[in-house]
Image (tube, rainbow, N blue to C red):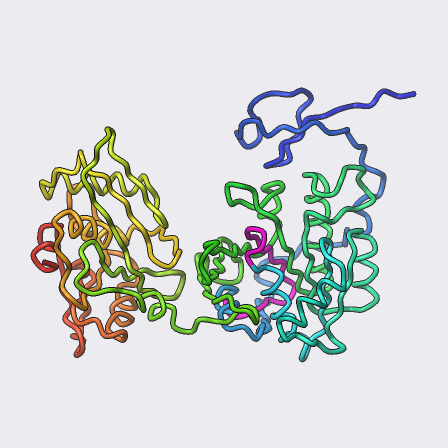
Amino acid sequence: MSKTKLVFECSVCGEQHSKWQGKCAGCGEWNTLIENVAQNSPKGRFSALASTSNVVKLAQVEAEDIKRKSTGVSELDRVLGGGLAIGSVILLGGDPGIGKSTLLLQTLDQLSNDSRVLYVTGEESIQQVALRASRLGVYGNDNLQLMAEIGLNHIIHAIEREKPNIVVIDSIQTMFTDILQSAPGSVAQVRECASILTRIAKNQHICIIMVGHVTKDGSIAGPRVLEHIVDAVLYFEGEQHSNFRMIRSVKNRFGAVNELGIFAMTDKGLREVSNPSALFLSSHRKDTPGSAILITQEGTRPLLVEVQALVDQSHIMPPKRLAVGMDSYRLSMLIAIMQRHSHLQLFDQDIFLNIVGGVKISEPAADLAVTIAIISSFKNKPIMEKVAMFGEIGLSGEIRTVQKGQERIKEAAKLGFTRIIVPKANLPKEKIASAQVIGVNNLNEVLDVCF
């Protein structure tokens, strides 16, 4: 009897090692090696997927426009870059219970009007899916088909038999192929199943949407190569106690990254939010110290959100620094800039920052609104009414230019803001009749305008 050979496989990148070690040599992550049984690749393993390709010159290739199909959900179309690209593979990740299956079921109901769609569930029974569909008011038609299966071979046969235009795999971590002996959800199974489904999508020109589980740190579970294989990676986000749901693209070969779509969760499923800026500002209270309006840019959409700050005397050292919806390291840097250039003594103050609505801001254009909100709370002075702002703050206190400034200014003016504070380099060439656009060079100039 032959001795079983063991290997140690990284759960992040899939790199294999002959012995256990604390750090993966492939991706550099710590404590990610899992013991598995080494598997021999059977002969002809990829023969069914292989295709004969000829070498051609780039000048001989005729570039064609990307063929897209609208999902019937405008917010999802925005995130995808205008709709589903034919032959694309999309990975949708999100926390458990956030609404991934609800969104897909509602989308498939729209797509089934003129396309054949197949919903493959590996986590629920067909009866459970039908119960959710009934609650959402999705009754379907002959083009909307369901299948409860985790065996990839059976799914491939169903695709060949039914010939759908769109296939949803819910979820990729539950699928397995007979080629490998490891359990469903393992690094090898996830990588293998995703590779086979991607090749099917490209060869048969169908769109495949794969649902992915996320880990406790928010990243999609499985090997990192999974995100490299697919054409688009979407994250479904939302606070547990909020009705807002946001879908964000972090990778998209057919559209803009960082695009944001916003939904509201109701008892009848997800509903699109056509004017998110007005919704986020609906609870904004005037004459409140520590509140500033930020004009941010999420993909191609300008968005106005409220930035709230609370500064209070600390009774312990070191003081607390907490940011919700923003990078805490960025907050610490801005506090140091304020202490140096605005002569504010914040070394003994607790500072708490919150981006209202559960939106996560990563762009440096939020620096100006964050700084003004902190100063407003520290001095206990409210900012003037109908003032919105954006701008990046440098380490020497200068206000630096940001991208897509004209779109931000127009969005704020459309929502009724009469004073818009921007970096001087972002001043529009033509005056805006309904708003006064004020260009600033440094932080001290902003304080004179706001207070």
The quarter of the displayed image where residue 233 is located: bottom right
Front in this rendered view, residue 284 or 93: 284
Residue 348: % across, % down = 18, 34
Identified at 16% across, 38% down, the residue is: 346
Q: Residue furthest front?
A: 315
Residue 442 located left or right of residue 152: left
For the record, the magenta segment spans: 81-98
What is the number of callouts on the image? 0
Q: Is residue 97 magenta?
A: yes
Identified at 76% across, 54% down, the residue is: 52
Quarter of the picture holding the N terminus: top right
Identified at 53% across, 58% down, the residue is: 253
The quarter of the displayed image where residue 127 is located: bottom right
Q: Is residue 3 above or below residue 107?
A: above
Residue 251: % across, % down = 51, 54
Q: Is residue 196 above or below residue 83?
A: above
Residue 318: % across, % down = 25, 29
Q: Residue furthest right?
A: 1
Front in this rendered view, residue 288 or 353: 288
Q: Residue furthest left?
A: 448
The quarter of the displayed image where residue 397 is located: top left
Quarter of the picture holding the C terminus: bottom left
Residue 260: % across, % down = 44, 62
Front in this rendered view, residue 215 or 176: 215
